[in-house]
Amino acid sequence: MQKDTGKHNGIASSSVRNIENKNLLCFNGYSVIGAMLIGLTGLGIGCLVSDFSLPFLGAMGILAIVGSLLPSGFFINGPNEAKVVEFFGEYIGTSFGMGLRFTVPFSTKRSVSLKIESTNTSVMKVNDADGNPIEIAAAVVWRIVSPAKACFNIENYQSFISVQGETALRELAGSYPYDSNSTVSLRQNSTEISQKLCAILQSRVGIVGIEVEDARISHLAYSSEIAQVMLRRQQAKAISEARVYIVKNAVSMVDEVLSHLEAKHGIDLTDDRKLKFVSNLLVALVSESETQPVISVE
């Protein structure tokens, strides 16, 4: 008795990962049915002509036996569907044609959908590149491009894409900050983040014949325990940036007013009066409340 070593012609069994689609040798099912009917009719006519001689009766019996085996070779393929066919445990090919088809009888046929599908990962709590806990989820759009790999390299590709989506999302979240003005961030650079997530996912699921069409973050927020703190931080940052913008423009306006007074009206203020004028004008421009005029009686 020969011992099965898990190798075939010196190739390890793990080489199934390199399996490629092969075109299945199959025929149009209606043509096969037509050929069977023509053959049966011709044999029947031959039997009548030969007055049911023994040779023709034997041929009729052989044809009946063969005809009883042929139905197992018929199968139906729908639009955007493929059939992966095995014959006694050996992969013999994949059929992409639509309609009624015929191939080797007693073969095992597995249907694989080629339609575009989407998977939503669950909301996960992870740490971003700055160590802040965030909640994140993604929507992945994918399709099968190699039915043979999807059948032979993975038991359940639906759950596989879901698990790999969550793993890739964790890796992505740990590589970028939630928010940043100087570098790529999860919140502000959606296009770059989507491309990176697609690349990570494709490197993980390509081995099972899946192509990632699109992957985008569908949920992104700070974790509940730091959400209020980060909200106040964002508000303080926004207020600070707004004040810098207001002061910068106010100084520019004051400078333009002084230049206009000197150039157009010939008003040349002393340093003290210029300092007082600048101070009063900046207060009027920067103040958040309405300014009240003060009349000097000096």
Image (cartoon, grey):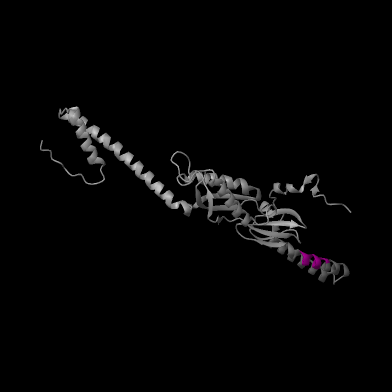
Residue 74 included in the magenta stretch of the image: no
Q: Position of residue 251 (x, y in %)?
A: 27, 35
Q: Main secondary structure of the magenta part?
A: helix
Q: Outermost residue, right direction?
A: 1
Q: Outermost residue, left direction?
A: 297
Figure quadrant of residue 94: bottom right
Q: Position of residue 20 (x, y in %)?
A: 69, 48
Q: Position of residue 174 (x, y in %)?
A: 54, 45
Residue 64 included in the magenta stretch of the image: yes
Residue drawn at x 27%, y 37% as measured from the top left: 250
Is residue 239 visible from the viewing direction of this image? yes
The residue range painted magenta reads 62-69
For the C terminus, the image quarter is: top left
Q: In this view, does 149 lie to the left or right of 162?
A: right
Q: Is residue 150 left or right of residue 124?
A: right
- Vertical position of residue 244 compared to residue 221: above or below: above
Is residue 263 visible from the viewing direction of this image? no
Q: Which of 188 and 87 is in front in this view?
A: 188
Residue drawn at x 75%, y 60% as measured from the top left: 107
Q: Position of residue 218 (x, y in %)?
A: 49, 53
Q: In this view, does 114 lie to the left or right of 17?
A: left
